[in-house]
Amino acid sequence: MGSDPVVGPARILVLEAGRRDAQYWRDLWLYRELFAILAWRDIAVRYKQTLVGVAWAVIRPFLTTLVLTVVFSRVARLPTEGDAPYPLLVLAGVLPWFLFATILSEAANSLVTNAQLVGKVYFPRIVLPLSAAVVSLVDLLVNLAAMAAVMLWFRFLPDWRVVVLPAFVVLAVLAALGPALLLAALNVKYRDFRHLIPFAVQFGLYISPVGFSSAHVPAQWALVYGLNPMVGVIDGFRWCLLGGQTALEPTSLVLSVAVSTFFLWYGGGVFRRTERSFADLI
């Protein structure tokens, strides 16, 4: 008789009350394949065997850019910054805003959308909002490729600052995840929050410097305005993509990082504290 095959050490997942945070994050690592499967599922639903997903990912920001350019450049007659064409100024603000808004909307509704999965199977629930955010990053890549084509058409190319762009992408994701985790937890218990999210996104579009430059904000309001975490993100995108034609205020950037960090800590804390009740409430 041959010898028995050598079996590697089994990974055992223990469910117990009051698990430590370190153990929770270890569980999250063990469920990394589930994260990849859910992320790929959402991407496939958006893009597989259809042109609508790709087209819609491009049409939405470009239509928004067109409207905001007409409103702020033609009607309000606000000037651009430096030599950057006004449509590029707006488009460079629209891309991070849509990244933020899509992550916020998709992640905040991810638990309710996957209610059957949450109610039947154990896994760290934070996998759902995190996987939902991946689709937004794919949309951003598509939009950046489209913006590159528009910049070639305007004969306006970025410089070395474009290598810093991934840092501002990370900041935009973190700025969105904090409120998204908070809203995801609240949305499970209070379903009315799903109606609040589109309103908050629409309102945020007009109080963020998407259609105009932050340079037009009065100096006495600059500090308060900088508490909007997307101010530093949008200014950073423009600084990277428009070759330094727009200003990047250190104060706004520091405030964006601080506010994003606070909401990530607070939203993540609320999510973790209420996570054990999701299966009962959903």
Image (cartoon, rainbow, N blue to C red):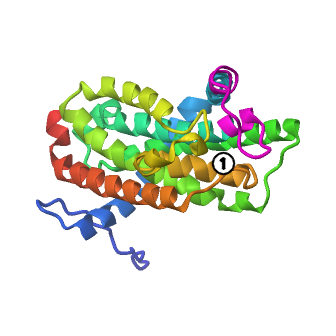
- Any part of residue 140 in sight: yes
Task: Please provide percent x and percent y for residue 206.
Answer: 49, 30
Task: Please provide percent x and percent y for residue 78.
Answer: 66, 31
Quarter of the image with the C terminus is top left
Q: Which residues are magenta?
A: 68-90
| Element under disc 1 | helix
Which residue appears at 69% of the width and 54% of the height?
Answer: 240
As drawn, is 250 to the left or to the right of 153? left
Q: Which quarter of the picture shows residue 119?
A: top left
Numbered-mark total: 1
Task: Please provide percent x and percent y for residue 251.
Answer: 49, 60
Q: Which residue is mark 1?
A: 238
Which residue appears at 28% of the width and 44% of the height?
Answer: 182
As drawn, is 101 to the left or to the right of 80? left
Task: Please provide percent x and percent y for residue 16.
Answer: 13, 61
Q: Which amino acid does the dot numbered 1 rest on? A: Arg
Q: Does 78 appear in magenta?
A: yes
Toward the viewer: 269 or 226? 226
Q: Is 98 drawn above or below residue 21 in the view shown?
A: above
Q: Is 202 drawn above or below residue 39 in the view shown?
A: above
Q: Does 242 appear in magenta?
A: no
Toward the viewer: 26 or 229? 229
Q: Residue furthest left?
A: 17
As drawn, is 4 to the left or to the right of 164? left
Quarter of the image with the N terminus is bottom left
Which residue appears at 39% of the width and 60% of the height?
Answer: 258
Which residue appears at 46% of the width and 34% of the height?
Answer: 207
As drawn, is 113 to the left or to the right of 74? left
| Label 1 crowd (10 A; few <14 / some 14-19 / many >=20) | many
